[in-house]
Amino acid sequence: MRTLESNRVLVIMPAWNEAACVGTTVAEVLALDEPYDVLVVNDGSTDQTAFEAAAAGAAVMNLPFNLGVGGAMRAGFKYADRLGYGQVIQVDADGQHDPRNIREVLNGLASADISIGARFADRGDYAVSGPRKWAMKLLAFVLSRLAKTPLTDVTSGFRAANRRAIAQYLDHYPAEYLGDTIDSLVVAIRSGLKVTQVPVEMRPRQGGTPSHHPIKAAVYLGRSFFALAFALTRKRSHLSLSIPATAGQK
Amino acid sequence: MMPNVAAFVLALAIVGLVVEMLRRKKLREKYAIWWLVVGIATLILAAFPQLLDVVARTVGIQLPSNLLFILSILMLLGVTLHLSWEISVVEDETRALAEEVAILRVQIENMTEQLPTAQKSRIENVEGHP
């Protein structure tokens, strides 16, 4: 087994049929000044995602079938945990998350266990409207109260975690829809992890179209309430909170 | 009232089938228990139909057949709920296995990369790489 210093950072990129942009995103991350390791979790893609990612220089984990973002992330966290990475950060393969913001989001871990790169925090021009906006506002309100810190974008997938958060994720990281963002965050907060947010700009997607359909938005609203209600009643993880924020060598 | 021969034979067939499936290990015990309960209850009722009237009267149901319907609906509800629960458990286990397999595969690939070429080709043949 490779041994790594615990200050290594793993960039986890869940990708499902993202052959068009995964290569560029991986290359952008690897071109940064900091030496990040990149793990692309190929979530049962039927296109060239795995090939493009490997060609760009990422380690590729091929899931045997599609598990959804939550499942892909859980596999990524397990991998990070086994190889002893000290910090992980989730970056979308579609290029929405600007790799140049990775350092800023990771810096948030200095004072917290989970750091979220947030869209609405006075930066960028990301705009949503209708039921989707109400849902996001309400979720942000409830989670801010829980976390006792202002959070504006709780569904953002651009988030970093330290060893304590990874350990908690491995105990509870639901694979359901919205489970990877809302549910996991609620249980993490209730288990005693500290959360903070860092304002970032989102870039337009480089492929695919975001859903603005009103019915889809309404369904999104309903499902987010559902996810939230369940998350609030779940039992918290009993962590051995002795794991310090920066653990020693594994 | 006469014992209902048709119902008795049917119940006997159900119980026989469940027992046989259990014997051949085609059915796990935890699923079989429901069907055995149903089969045995049907057997008893078919043998003594007046039992249904007595029970219906004591619980206050006017039409004995309604008691039968309520019991069957409750029982089917129980079975479906049980199956939903079991399939959720199995799905979770499958996920965990998929993650495990994926991690192991990355690790094997990393290890083979570090091996000398002669050994590498041998392992890749065994692995059956595409």
Image: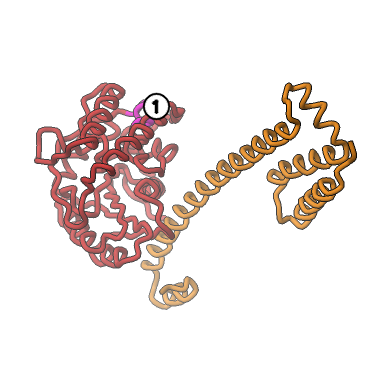
Chain colours: A red, B orange
Q: Main SS of the magenta segment?
A: helix
Residue A24 spot, x, y in % from top left: 18, 60
Q: Does residue A242 appear in the picture of this structure? A: no
Which residue corresponds to the image point at 32% horizontal and 57% vertical from the top-left? A16
Residue tagged 1: A232
- Asked whether residue A42 is drawn in magenta, I would say no
Q: Nearer the viewer, residue A48 or B1?
A: B1
Q: Nearer the viewer, residue A70 or A82?
A: A70
Residue A14 spot, x, y in % from top left: 31, 52
In the displayed structure, does residue B123 sit left or right of residue A148?
right
Q: Amino acid at mark 1?
A: Leu
Q: Nearer the viewer, residue B48 or A101?
A: B48
Quadrant in the rendering for residue A7: top left
Quadrant in the rendering for residue A194: top left
The image shows residue A100, relative to residue B55, as above or below, that is below
Quadrant in the rendering for residue A81: top left
- Span of residues in magenta: A186-193
Crowding around mark 1 (Cα neighbors within 10 Å: few <14, some 14 to 19, many 20+) is: some
Which residue corresponds to the image point at 40% horizontal and 31% vertical from the top-left? A231
Q: Does residue A22 appear in the picture of this structure? A: yes
Residue B21 spot, x, y in % from top left: 75, 55
**Label 1 element class:** helix
In the displayed structure, does residue A61 sit left or right of residue A159?
right
Q: Quadrant of the C terminus of chain A?
A: top left
Q: Nearer the viewer, residue A99 or B60?
A: B60
Residue B1 spot, x, y in % from top left: 89, 36
In the displayed structure, does residue B130 sit left or right of residue B32?
left
Q: Quadrant of the N terminus of chain A?
A: bottom left
Which residue corresponds to the image point at 84% horizontal and 31% vertical from the top-left? B51
Numbered disc total: 1
Subunit ID for the residue under disc 1: A
